[in-house]
Image: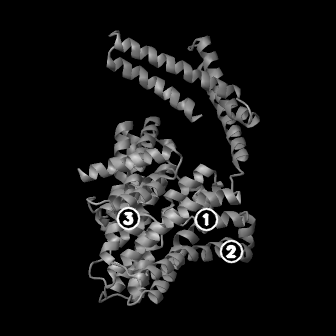
Amino acid sequence: MELLLLVLGALAVATLARREDWPAPLVLTAVGIGVSFIPGVPEFRLDPELVLPLVLAPLLYSASLNSSYLDIRANIRPIGLLAVGLVLATTAAVGLVAYWVVPGLGLAPALVLGAVVAPPDAVAAVAIGRRLGLPRRAMTLLTGESLGNDATALTAFKVAVAAAIGATSFSWSDGLLTFLEAAIGGVVVGLLLAVAVHAIRLRIGDGVLESALGLLVPFAAYLIAEEVHASGVLAVVVAGLYLGHNSPAAGFSTRLQETAVWRSVDVLLESLVFALIGLQVRTVFADASPDWDMVGASVVVLLSAVLVRFVWVFPSAYVPRALSRRVREREQAPGWRQVLVIGWAGMRGVVSLAAAAAIPLEMPGRDVVVLLAFVVTVGTLLVQGLTLPALIRGLGVRDTGEQQRLLAQAQAQNEAARASLSRLDEITADGSVPEHMVRRLRSLAEHRGNAAWERLGRQDQESPAAAYRRARKEMLTAERAAFVAARDRGEIDDETLRVVQRELDLEEAVLSRE
């Protein structure tokens, strides 16, 4: 019952935030912190054995499905610098700072802290950036970073924990080998599983069963990879990227169902996770019982986690261009405003808290490390998350490529319309299709081909295509009301209503998507 109330409460807060156009992750965290101090509220703790496979895996898989493999491949160098280089640099920098400022904290436990807080969670940043129209390349970098940094951080975490608990056979060379084995193994497992699932789905021919199989992929990828000591997170990401890139080969019903299902799963899990982040604050502070010296050290660690990102992103954005002519020719120089926004978009999230909860009880300084991890996570979520929209607006960082993308879409739609009309001529050459139906089919193809051109040329007024969609939606609403009235009068049954309603819904979905 407590879990049910938690989920319902989180969804209620998320609904209010989405309706008011507030960043839902930040609102959920703030509300969770407030609720945690209400007397009688039960303690909630993240169980890493459940959070990583049951929460993180589906969230990463859903993000991977909706990511662009082509964009990520085109930006693999800067994404790699963020997802791998920055994570390792943050692990080292935050670990050293914590070692220096926290009394009695050893170097190995401090590095565990560094690995715990190293991976930013891009959920809040991407949501804010999408709402405010961040440039496409910035969104690609943030999304690509979020897909790869978790695997790097969790692998570094395992290595640091082995050193902290004094594993007898541990050495740093073994740690590096473990890191490489986990990364390569995760890629291989994810790719093999995705290829097999894609081949099976192409032969099923049933959208419901194909979607059901897709729901199992993130959990299977994570568990199989972890079973063979590979990176479960990386396996999930690779599987999602492969299946998302090859989704055009699947059936239309599979794509429609998967889109709806994963959007619902995302909202549910994200709401639950960010509410849990806030609800655990009171428990963590009670366990650690911090004094004023610890409060000061926590602030220093938080600042170091924020600053190391700036120290890394600016040189990584410009130094490769200065050293390589090939990079200068292939990539456009990013503006300093865009780099500044990426540097400030370093909010931590569920991975940091799940890793903190997974620290072995026998590790020296565990309570202190968990406390510092929560300070960094909640601090970055609230401070950076609340100020990121104002920073984006103040710097005027906007997507200037919408016109070019609309032009490319118009050209592609025009070519698709010509292919469609050519095929129509072929299949109607024998006269088997009535002439009035041919004219209607031709009109539909021409309408879709001209829609993007009309949007391109009529930015400040309603285009004919937009007027058509508006009028057709009104007609569909009237049709739906008539069918419902017929059902209520007993003229048709519910099964008939569901059949016709699905046809109307599919057409309205097409109109809304356009």
Q: Which residue is mark 3?
A: 232
**Residue sitting nearer the eye, 457 or 302:** 302
Q: For the residue labelled by badge 3, is the local secondary structure a helix, a strand or a loop?
A: helix
Identity of the residue drawn at 50% across and 17% down: 478
**Placement of the C terminus among the 4 image quadrants:** top right
Q: For the residue labelled by badge 1, is the local secondary structure a helix, a strand or a loop?
A: helix
Mark 1 or mark 3: which comes first in sequence? Answer: 3
Relative to residue 482, is residue 60 depicted above or below? below
Mark 2 or mark 1: which comes first in sequence? Answer: 2
Q: For the residue labelled by badge 2, is the local secondary structure a helix, a strand or a loop?
A: helix
Identity of the residue drawn at 29% across and 89% down: 168
Q: Can see residue 153?
A: no
Q: Can see residue 103?
A: yes
Instruction: Please name which of the two marks, 2 or 1, marks the residue nearer to the observer.
Output: 1
- Whether tag 3 and tag 2 are in contact, CB under 8 A, the answer is no
The amino acid marked with disc number 1 is Ile
Q: Which residue is mark 1?
A: 342
Residue 199: x %, y % from top left: 41, 47
Relative to residue 111, is residue 459 depicted above or below? above
Relative to residue 379, is residue 367 depicted above or below? below
What distance separates the C-alpha of mark 1 from that of mark 3?
27 Å
Q: Which residue is mark 2?
A: 320
Residue 56 location, quadrant: bottom left
What distance separates the C-alpha of mark 2 from that of mark 1?
17 Å
